[in-house]
Amino acid sequence: MAEPTEQDQIKTFRDFMANYNKLSETCFTDCAWDFTTRKVLNSESTCALNCAEKYLKMNQRVSARFQVIARRGWFWK
């Protein structure tokens, strides 16, 4: 298998950053409730951990499914 080009590496990094930013935004919006204190509440912390875990598992499943579909050539027929 050929070495990834610089453009491939940049695209991979951009994809990673877009995914990371989406996860951060989604979980912050869903889990940060109390802005009257600097302290992170236990419920907020638990929510953020659960949110991140679900998001990452979902992303992993979608990626795996996409790879199966791509290998079968369904997108390029």
Image (cartoon, rainbow, N blue to C red):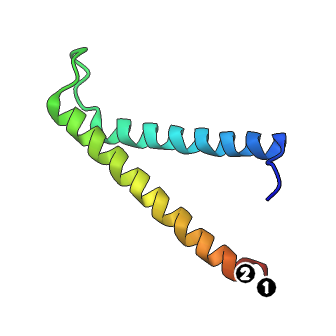
Dividing the picture into quadrants, the one containing residue 76 is bottom right
- Amino acid beneath label 1: Lys
**Label 2–label 1 contact, CB within 8 A:** yes
Q: Residue furthest top?
A: 38
65 relative to 44, above or below? below
Residue 52 vs residue 23: left or right? Answer: left
- Amino acid beneath label 2: Gly
Categorize mark 2 by other alpha carbons within 10 Å: few (<14), some (14-19), many (20+): few
Separation of disc 2 and disc 1 at Cα?
A: 7 Å
Residue 6 vs residue 73: left or right? Answer: right
- Where disc 2 sits, the SS reads loop
- Where disc 1 sits, the SS reads loop
Residue 63 vs residue 35: left or right? Answer: right
- The structure residue drawn at horizontal position 44% and vertical position 37%, both measured from the top left corner, is 24
Which residue in the structure is indicated by mark 1? 77
Which mark identifies residue 73? 2
Dividing the picture into quadrants, the one containing residue 33 is top left
Looking at this view, is 35 or 40 the one in front? 40
- The structure residue drawn at horizontal position 74% and vertical position 45%, both measured from the top left corner, is 11
x, y percent for residue 10: 75, 39
> Where, quadrant-wise, is the N terminus in this rendering?
bottom right
x, y percent for residue 15: 64, 46
- The structure residue drawn at horizontal position 22% and vertical position 34%, both measured from the top left corner, is 44
Label tally? 2
- The structure residue drawn at horizontal position 72% and vertical position 77%, both measured from the top left corner, is 75
68 relative to 57, above or below? below
